[in-house]
């Protein structure tokens, strides 16, 4: 690659004191021949994040801080993009770490294929046993299924891109992030990019180290918010509907019906007609089958050791069932006002 345009990294931050320093180091240490700047949009954190960010900015003139009092991701991204200056805009996350050649590879791919947005793989990893188990669930096809940025796919055009490496002019043409989309704003922006006739591209060689939630409660809250906004997308856009998004709600209905059947069976064992007893028995087996499938997927995952494999098995329902409940809420009532409480202290 002979052309090294300047790059502006834009980062929304909220309650990331334990991760921000490593994330920033991975950005500023990129092996890239062009100019670099990092614009951090600071939300109303309560864990000392803003102090960490201030110290980082004082130590390196390439870091600019902007205030994001609302704490919403799309608002943060728009504030950071408007405060940045270089022709390539790279969205980064405070809960992630870039491999040292990420920028060079991403910009080269952007130029090579003529895309306006490029993304790669979310390489989930963990520091604690629970976080490593959740990361293993992220890597499993049983965990998230279809998206290329979770499980991988051949290089090519994509529906959306993880994080995103953009040509700045695309924001002038199609607009910035929709600030009413508190989550899934990347999918909606990619839709507008594709509708404008431009390429959104997936490059599997681009891998970003990502640290997921580190408790099952936080994971469940994140999954619920993600499902709700995915339901909003399906409600709002014909292109946002997919058969695979209907599977978790069917699973939730089956598990709920099975739990009711398990509670009812002891009271109907002697009085219910045989067809009803058979139906109740089959229905009651659904949560048991799902539990067995989760256990199998956990032990088939990349988790290390029996403990982490068991934790990975537990992570699947913490992903699937809240996501399904959120999706139903988003499809029926919309997602307005729903935000990810997983990182709110």
Image (tube, rainbow, N blue to C red):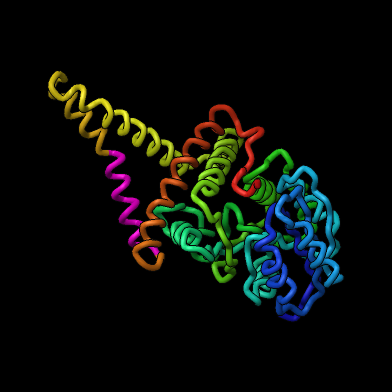
Q: Among all residues in the image, which is located at the extreme front?
A: 47
Looking at the picture, does residue 214 appear above or below residue 180?
A: below
All told, the count of numbered labels is 0
Q: Closest to the observer: 334 or 266? A: 266
Q: Please identify the quadrant where the N terminus is shown.
A: bottom right
Residue 145 x, y percent position in the rendering: 44, 52
Residue in the image at 48% along x and 40% along y: 322
Residue 276 x, y percent position in the rendering: 19, 23
Looking at the picture, does residue 149 appear above or below residue 107?
A: above
Q: Closest to the observer: 203 or 40? A: 40
Residue 302 x, y percent position in the rendering: 40, 66
Q: Closest to the observer: 179 or 94? A: 94
Q: Closest to the observer: 20 or 182? A: 20
Residue 236 x, y percent position in the rendering: 61, 34
Report the magenta residues as a range.
286-301
Residue in the image at 46% along x and 52% along y: 144
Is residue 213 visible in this depiction of the protein? yes
Q: As drawn, is 139 to the left or to the right of 76?
A: left
Q: Quadrant of residue 313?
A: bottom left
Residue in the image at 65% along x and 76% along y: 101
Q: Main secondary structure of the magenta part?
A: helix
Q: As drawn, is 238 to the left or to the right of 8?
A: left
Looking at the picture, does residue 58 appear above or below residue 240?
A: below
Residue in the image at 80% along x and 55% along y: 80
């Amino acid at each position: 690659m002979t052309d090294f345009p300047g790059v502006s990294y834009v980062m929304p931050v909220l309650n990331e004191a334990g991760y921000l320093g490593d994330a920033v180091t991975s950005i500023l240490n990129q092996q890239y021949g062009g100019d670099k700047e990092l614009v951090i949009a600071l939300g109303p954190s309560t864990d000392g994040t803003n102090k960490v960010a201030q110290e980082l900015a004082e130590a390196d003139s390439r870091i600019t801080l902007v205030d994001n009092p609302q704490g919403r991701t799309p608002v943060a991204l728009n504030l950071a993009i408007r405060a940045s200056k270089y022709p390539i805009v790279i969205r980064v996350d405070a809960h992630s770490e870039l491999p040292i050649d990420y920028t060079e590879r991403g910009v080269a791919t952007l130029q090579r294929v003529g895309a306006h947005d490029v993304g790669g793989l979310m390489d989930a990893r963990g520091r604690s046993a629970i976080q490593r188990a959740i990361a293993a669930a992220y890597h499993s096809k049983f965990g998230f299924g279809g998206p290329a940025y979770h499980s991988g796919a051949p290089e090519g055009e994509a529906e959306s891109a993880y994080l995103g490496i953009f040509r700045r002019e695309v924001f002038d043409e199609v607009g910035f992030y929709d600030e009413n989309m508190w989550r899934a704003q990347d999918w909606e922006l990619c839709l507008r990019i594709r509708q404008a006739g431009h390429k959104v591209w997936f490059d599997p060689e681009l891998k970003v180290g990502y640290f997921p939630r580190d408790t099952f409660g936080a994971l469940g809250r994140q999954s619920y918010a993600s499902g709700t906004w995915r339901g909003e997308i399906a409600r709002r856009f014909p292109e946002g509907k997919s058969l695979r998004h209907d599977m978790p709600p069917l699973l939730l209905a089956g598990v709920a019906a099975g739990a009711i059947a398990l509670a009812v069976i002891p009271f109907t064992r002697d009085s219910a007609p045989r067809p009803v007893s058979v139906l109740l028995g089959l229905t009651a087996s659904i949560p048991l089958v799902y539990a067995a499938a989760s256990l199998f997927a956990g032990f088939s995952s990349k988790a290390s050791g029996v403990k982490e494999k068991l934790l990975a098995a537990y992570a699947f329902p913490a992903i699937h069932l809240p996501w399904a409940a959120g999706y139903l809420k988003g499809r029926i009532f919309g997602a307005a006002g729903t935000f990810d409480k997983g990182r709110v202290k």
